[in-house]
Amino acid sequence: MPKLRHIAIAAEDPEAMAEFYKKAFDFVEVGRPNGHLADGVFLSDGTLNMAILKFKTDQLGKGMDYRGIHHFGVMVEDVEEFTKKLDALGAEHYIDQAQDGHQAGYFEKKFFGPERILFDIAEHGWAGAEPLPTPVKAAAE
Amino acid sequence: MAKLRHLAIACKDPDAMAEFYMKAFDFTVARRGDGPLAYGVHLTDGTIDLALLRFKSDQIGKGMDYTGLHHFGILVEDMDAAAQKAESLGGKHYMDQSDPDRTGGFEVKMYGPEGILFDVAEHPWTGTEPLPVPAKQAAE
């Protein structure tokens, strides 16, 4: 089954916000993304990647001063298969992984679901996120 | 370590949105609820509660028309200790669960830096994974 493995927060000061969650809940810093879409800090609770980001574009249409939870990400076994499935369900494809090199921890495809909720799907996983569970059949082999 | 175990989306039509995520990702319904704060559907991927909620009040100051990601929730071993620690770091207490016997949802709501709303609970959200057993305890 696909798994929620990523939460992204739009912040004015990612570093200060990351310090709060590190100190309050012992989340661990696992990266400092610096790309053309956003800069920030990646934290992990050992299962999910929590990305605290200062975005460089208005992906949501809520304005550049939007602060709050921004999008989430679902880890899937096969991005292409899920792309077809999402298209069939009416999701709107937004953008793909940047062509200027894969950077571990980034999205692979972004979609708008119902009510224009933005989410990512990825099969390689975000930095610090737990891999998908091994299917029972494969684990038994 | 505390764990992210809840993600809430503010939406107009929780039932339609739930259908989408159930069909898209095989998430299952953990529960449906109509409480004083919101009507909605709680999905689970087996680990996390994805709550699709039509809120009845403006908890995050973005207006009642706001749709989008709303708040997240963190499962902790000791809620009082975690809430105190968050407050000592500048977090602001927002509200407590009004029904002290109710578990499976938030127990305390707080605002963190930049007014980001999050829940803290020491009982797992319905349908979600509990905290891992500490290695020392598991070995006993």
Image: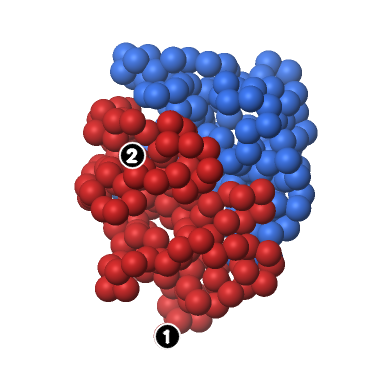
Q: Image height check: is A134 above or below A24?
A: above
Task: Judge the density around disc 2: few (<14), some (14-19), many (≥20) Cα neighbours within 10 Å.
Answer: many
Point out which mark residue B140 bears.
1
Q: Nearer the viewer, residue A39 or A30?
A: A39
Q: Position of residue A126 (x, y in %)?
A: 58, 40
* Location of residue A80 by image quarter: top left
Residue at which label 2 appears: B54
Q: Image height check: is B128 above or below A86?
A: below
Q: Chain of mark 1?
A: B
- Residue name at image x 50 percent, y 81 percent: B136
- Residue name at image x 48 percent, y 37 percent: B63
Colour scheme: by chain
- Residue name at image x 24 percent, y 33 percent: B15
* Location of residue A88 by image quarter: top left
Q: Position of residue B84 (x, y in %)?
A: 58, 75
Sequence order check: which comes first, mark 1 or mark 2?
Answer: 2
Q: Nearer the viewer, mark 1 or mark 2?
A: 2
**Residue B23, can we see it?**
no
Q: Nearer the viewer, residue B14 or B127?
A: B14
Cα separation between marks 1 and 2: 45 Å
Q: Amino acid at mark 2?
A: Arg
Q: Position of residue B133 (x, y in %)?
A: 44, 72
Q: Colour of chain B?
A: red
Q: Chain of mark 2?
A: B
- A20 lies left or right of B116: right
* Location of residue A101 by image quarter: top right
Q: Image height check: is B28 above or below A122?
A: below
Task: Judge the density around disc 1: few (<14), some (14-19), many (≥20) Cα neighbours within 10 Å.
Answer: few
Q: Position of residue A93 (x, y in %)?
A: 48, 15
Q: Quadrant of the N terminus of chain A?
A: top left
- Secondary element at image label 2: strand
The chain assigned the colour blue in the figure is: A
